[in-house]
Amino acid sequence: MNSRLIYLLSFGLISFVLAMPQHLQAKSYIAYISDSTNSSVIYWIAKEAGILKKHGLDLDLIFINGSVRGIQSLIAGDLSYSGAVGTAVINAKLAGADIAIIQSQMNTLPYFIIGNANIKSPEGLKGRSAAVHIPGTSADFAMRLALSKVGIPYSDIKAVTVGGAPARLAAVTNGQMDFTVVTDGERIQGEKMGLKVIIDMAKLNVPFQFNCSVTTRTKIRDNPDEVRRVVWSMAESIHFFKTRKEESIKIMQKYTRGLPRHVLEGAHAANSELLVEDTYPTIDGLKNTLEVQAASDARAAKFKAEDMVELRFVDEMRKSGFVDKLYGRKK
């Protein structure tokens, strides 16, 4: 085949691909944003238990570290859906992103500040080094909130951005950092390795939009049926997790690279209590975060919590009785 023919065929193929509708050019993806034992477990279940396929969804599951990066990829058009937390959604909205939370998995801050055993009290965190996540993540917000509750300005710690929970935990257990913020699975691991809980965030009972699913308003407008099926599949995945422990732990082992059984047992128990059956987002939690944000960013005062969500799909699911049927409840 001569070079001119190869050129013409290549040019024709490129022109054909560019002329295709965008939704046919690339695979659709849904991103999970943490390899922690609770932050993304429902996405793992949805994929591995075949629940996405059961609801007629052809979505590939991929990992993007951190909800800020997940939302950036969503806005760029690289994803159809992403896991996220309320803080990252709010920051994206303040920057002009046209996105919305379509369902929730957890509506509180399930975090612990853990550190070296020689830190005797919360006040002892002052001046210490902390392994933190990138700004805008729930772990970042939890760290700042915990410090504010004990009267320590964030500037009074030595914060080092390390990344996800496993990396943060490793930085403290190997002695590079003094303390960090983790969820229940990493707390169990940390205590096993000699760390101690310094602040239990759950005891603060702060409503907070933790794990949730986000998509663009364009996707909601152009393909509401697919969005609806994503919402319903997440609710069914939560039911699977709560009612099929052994299979869920097996899936968790795969995605957390074989964490010990006792860690996964503890994480499963904690998650089962916190997961929201009807997947309804927390408006109060979003209001609280907006109020905190408004203190440092005047743009936040122009938004309402309702601007961050699209509730029609969870409303429809609630009215349909789908969740009640999953749990064998009579409506």
Image (cartoon, grey):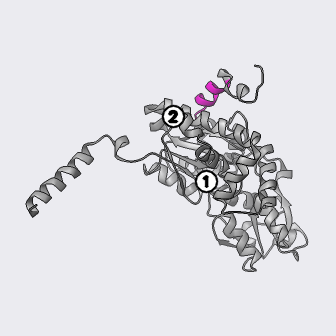
Q: Which SS does the magenta portion mostly show?
A: helix
Report which residue position mark 2 lands on.
Answer: 56
Q: Marks 1 and 2, Cα distance to the nearest angstrom?
A: 41 Å
- Name the amino acid type tagged 1: Asp
Q: Nearer the viewer, mark 1 or mark 2?
A: 2
Determine crowd level at label 1: few under 14, some 14-19, many 20+ residues with C-alpha closer than 10 A: few
- Name the amino acid type tagged 2: Gly
- In the rendered image, residue 61, in percent from the top left (x then y), is placed at 53, 50
Report which residue position mark 1 lands on.
Answer: 297
Does the image show residue 162? Answer: yes
Examine the structure image and report whether residue 111 is included in the region drawn in magenta. Answer: no
- In the rendered image, residue 253, in percent from the top left (x then y), is placed at 69, 58
In this picture, which residue range is highlighted in magenta? 310-318
- In the rendered image, residue 169, in percent from the top left (x then y), is placed at 73, 69
Q: Is residue 69 above or below residue 288?
A: below
Tag 1 secondary structure:
loop
Q: Nearer the viewer, residue 200 or 284?
A: 200
Q: Would residue 143 appear left or right of 22 to someone viewing this image? A: right
Task: Name the residue at 69% across, 54% down.
Answer: 252
Q: Quadrant of residue 309?
A: top right
- In the rendered image, residue 256, in percent from the top left (x then y), is placed at 67, 60
Among numbered discs 1 and 2, the one appearing first in the sequence: 2
